[in-house]
Image (tube, grey):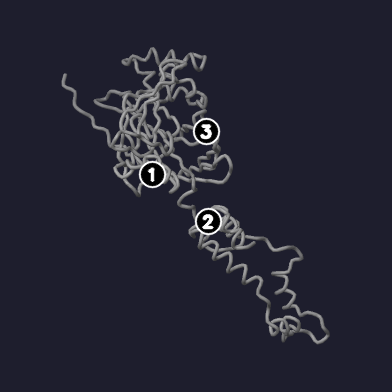
Amino acid sequence: MSTEKWKSLSRPELQKLAQKKGVAGATRKTKDELIAALAKLSKSKTKPKSTTAHKSQARPQRHAAHLTNGAASAEEKIGSSKFDMGVPTKDLSAKVPRELPKGYGKDRIVCMVRDPYWLHVYWELTRQAVQRAEAALGQDWHGAKPILRVLDVTSTETFSASESALRDIDIHGGCNNWYIDVANPPRSFRVDIGYLARNGQFYILARSNVVTTPRAAMSDVIDENWADFDLEKADKIFAMSGGFDPGASSLEIKQLFEERLRRPMGSPSVTSFGSGAFMFGKERKFWFRLDAELIVYGATEPNAKVTLQGDPVKLRPDGTFTMRYSLPDSRQIIPAVAYSADGVEERTIVLAVERNTKHLEPILNEVQE
């Protein structure tokens, strides 16, 4: 392939071609550097071999341990078997980890929900996009500044498509992500990135996806929490929730358990739950337990594929997902990997969580009569 043909290719195409040719560090090179490396590689392959080298290959030197009758020695057979197996050698270059590129040459901004009151956006803008903004703003370009415009796109009506700009956030060069605080959950938001001129003209470079913040209170949906409920431990969980405490208002809890399990709950006399401390010669039934669980949530493109600890995750229509994990007293490493729909891009986030629970000695206070 000629140099003129290489110049007509884009940088990503040249990077892919250079990687196939075995050019080291292809993802970090510029377009001119890639063309120079390919040209150098092409010249080295087309250079004719010297006569001396040809002669040395034509008459290889015999091994000193070669048998006089022309048969190979045992050492030669063992040595040659390591490399000559009668099949093509396996190419291991695909298993060598490659560095992720700093950019993918695509103008985009992605918005994700961190919690009910915070959003996180990250973006990538090419030089061509900035040049288009400069040409569109004309003489107002010199006073323009890059901003993030946060829009509330919450719809109260089925066929409503109204939106309102909440505020503009000034950003500076060199950053490619931002945390945005929002209020009044649940609400739906979109974020635009672009240049704002002094006359109020806003040139949009990229527009994000729409996200919805969750409710700040406890969820009213409880049915899905019973999907993986351990029926054998129902009595224990019922006791831990105060169901067997006669002094507590546990009627609703009992009705909830009996409705979900479709059986009556046992009495405390036939259970073995409770710490049972002794004080002043009187048996006490007071007890206290505490547990926790881990909820992992995130978002990506709706058509992407996501795995957590190697297990596939089902995405919602808007690309969000939520997973619940047990949280024992230990350190957990949860790698999350997202794959683009076309299989080109892969992003990995590793979450490390550690729990330490400490039980203090109980305190018995004297009760005055």
Q: Amino acid at mark 1?
A: Glu
What percent of the width, then of the height, locates residue 16? 58, 55
Secondary structure beneath dot 2 equals loop
Identify the mark nearer the N-term, 2 or 1. Answer: 2
Residue 134, disc: 1
> Seen in the image, is 113 located left or right of residue 6?
left
Q: Residue tagged by mark 2?
A: 98
Q: Is residue 107 above or below residue 238?
A: below
Q: Is residue 367 left or right of residue 61?
A: left
**Secondary structure type for disc 3:** loop
The residue depicted at 47 percent of the width and 14 percent of the height is 258
* Quadrant in which the N terminus is drawn: bottom right
Dot placed on the residue nearer the N-terminal end, 1 or 3: 1
**Residue found at the far right of this picture:** 69
Question: x%, y% of residue 111?
Answer: 42, 35
Q: Which residue is mark 3?
A: 302
Which of the pair 162/330 is nearer the observer?
162
Q: Are marks 1 and 3 in contact (CB under 8 Å)?
A: no
* Along the line of sight, the residue nearer the viewer: 84 or 78: 84
